[in-house]
Amino acid sequence: MKQVKALVFDTFGTVVDWRSGVARAVRPFLVAHGRADLDPFAVADAWRRRYQPAMEECRTGRRPFTQLDTLHRENLEHTLRDHGIDPAGVAEADLADLNLAWHRLDPWPDVLLGLFRLKKKYFLAPASNGNILLLAQMAKRAGIPWDAILGAEAVQAFKPRPEHYLRTAEVLRMAPAEVCLVAAHNRDLRAARAVGLSTAFVARPTEHGPGQTIDLAADDNWDCVATDFVDMATKLGC
């Protein structure tokens, strides 16, 4: 890690707890639309399951690159139909507000302290599939101290496409090895390492709820492995 100048972070799951935040927004929506019987966490999980397939349409070229806010909105409407709610019967303002749940996610408890320590030594930015407005509003609300807002919209590619990682390094005018991807997802780290980035794993064993079975630990000898952002700051001398 001695060559690393910038830390770029997977965001959904690594920096913020998407599941709790989305369920928090879904709960009153379900009550307001007569479906208080539904589990808001189950609806949040169903909405999230459409995330990767929607981006895959863009990764493969079957669809042009599309902002994640747009994909989330399309996925929301499909998810509501699957749960017996016709989006055509929901006010546009209510749908738009619920879609913004992804802009209002809370960081994990260790994140802010860890990032402020890491910021003393490293350039910090998100390397997320989120779009610029989403990531900026999330950071503004939560006080996340990014030095810049990067991510899929800035580089016009969704992870784990290699160009996402390489263009991020190009934007920063750094060699790939000088940029370290920090993620709670081994798949993301494998893709980053394959094109020369440095890698850091931080465990988030409850990202997908209490029954999570994936990414409970580092699957490889990543350049840094930490229990949380504070632990990573300590290991990196911050």
Image (tube, rainbow, N blue to C red):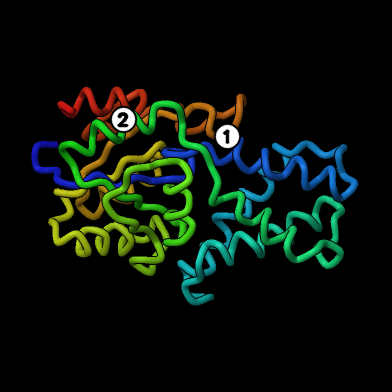
Residue matched to label 1: 208
Residue type at the position of mark 2: Gly
Determine the image quadrant of residue 189: top left
Whether residue 37 sits left or right of residue 16 in the image: it is: right
Horizontal side of 115 relative to 39 (left or right) equals left
In percent of the image, x 83 and y 67: which residue is there? Answer: 88
Looking at the image, is 230 positioned above or below residue 21?
A: above
Quadrant holding the C terminus: top left
Q: Quadrant of the N terminus?
A: top left
**Badge 1 amino acid:** His
How much space separates mark 2 and mark 1, taking CA atoms? Answer: 22 Å
Q: Give the percent coordinates (x, y) of residue 16.
A: 47, 39
Q: Secondary structure at mark 1?
A: loop
Q: Which residue is mark 2?
A: 114
Local SS, label 2: helix
Height in image: 41 above or below 70?
Answer: above
Label 1 crowding class (10 Å Cα cut-off): few <14, some 14-19, many 20+? some
